[in-house]
Amino acid sequence: MLTEFTPIQSLLGGVLIGLAAVMLMAFNGRVAGMTGIVSGVLPPYSGANRWRLAFLAGAIAAPIAYLALGGGIGFAVPVSTTALIVGGLIVGVGVTYGSGCTSGHGVCGMARLSPRSIVATLVFMATTFATVYVTRHVIGV
């Protein structure tokens, strides 16, 4: 399965993610880690939720607005629902042990030159490479 190369959309998406992360840090002093943001709106509540709800609303509204303006989002899942559930559980365990997710460590932590975030991101990437290799070339999915 090949992925379509979309340099303009990728660049714009990266700029928007970076801008959102910088604005959240500048205005709220918070790191834009999606795991922490989502966990803050789930019980038990961790305090002020308005900024978290606003951030999540933007993350949901942006692709909807993109579609409404005529853009397209190609999406295909080449694995079973069971594999998606197992993968989601593994990711949940990983972000718990890693004290954050790729957005928190990879985007925000690395931008701050955090050694912990750099190591975490290297582990995320190595695990991703290994998973894709095993899935595509060993298992044959």
Image: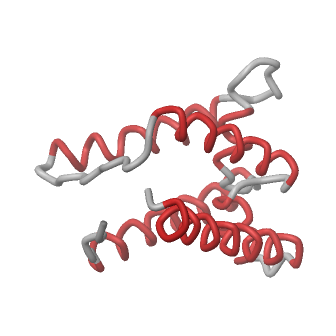
Residue at 84% in and 56% down? 98
Q: In which image quadrant can residue 35 be found?
A: top right
Location of residue 21 in the rendering, given as x and y in whole percent from the top left corner: 60, 61
Q: Report the side of 93 relative to 74 (left or right).
A: right
Location of residue 112 in the rendering, given as x and y in whole percent from the top left corner: 77, 76
Give the residue furthest to the left.
Answer: 70
Residue at 44% in and 71% down? 15
Q: Report the side of 135 relative to 40 (left or right).
A: left
Q: Is residue 18 above or below residue 24?
A: below
Frontmost residue, 12 versus 136: 136
- Quadrant holding the C terminus: bottom left
Frontmost residue, 30 versus 140: 140
Q: Report the side of 72 relative to 40 (left or right).
A: left
Location of residue 11 in the rendering, given as x and y in whole percent from the top left corner: 37, 76
- Quadrant holding the N terminus: bottom left
> Which color mode does the image show?
secondary structure
Frontmost residue, 138 versus 46: 138
Residue at 66% in and 35% down? 38
Q: Is residue 131 above or below residue 41?
A: below
Location of residue 127 in the rendering, given as x and y in whole percent from the top left corner: 69, 67
Give the residue furthest to the top.
Answer: 43
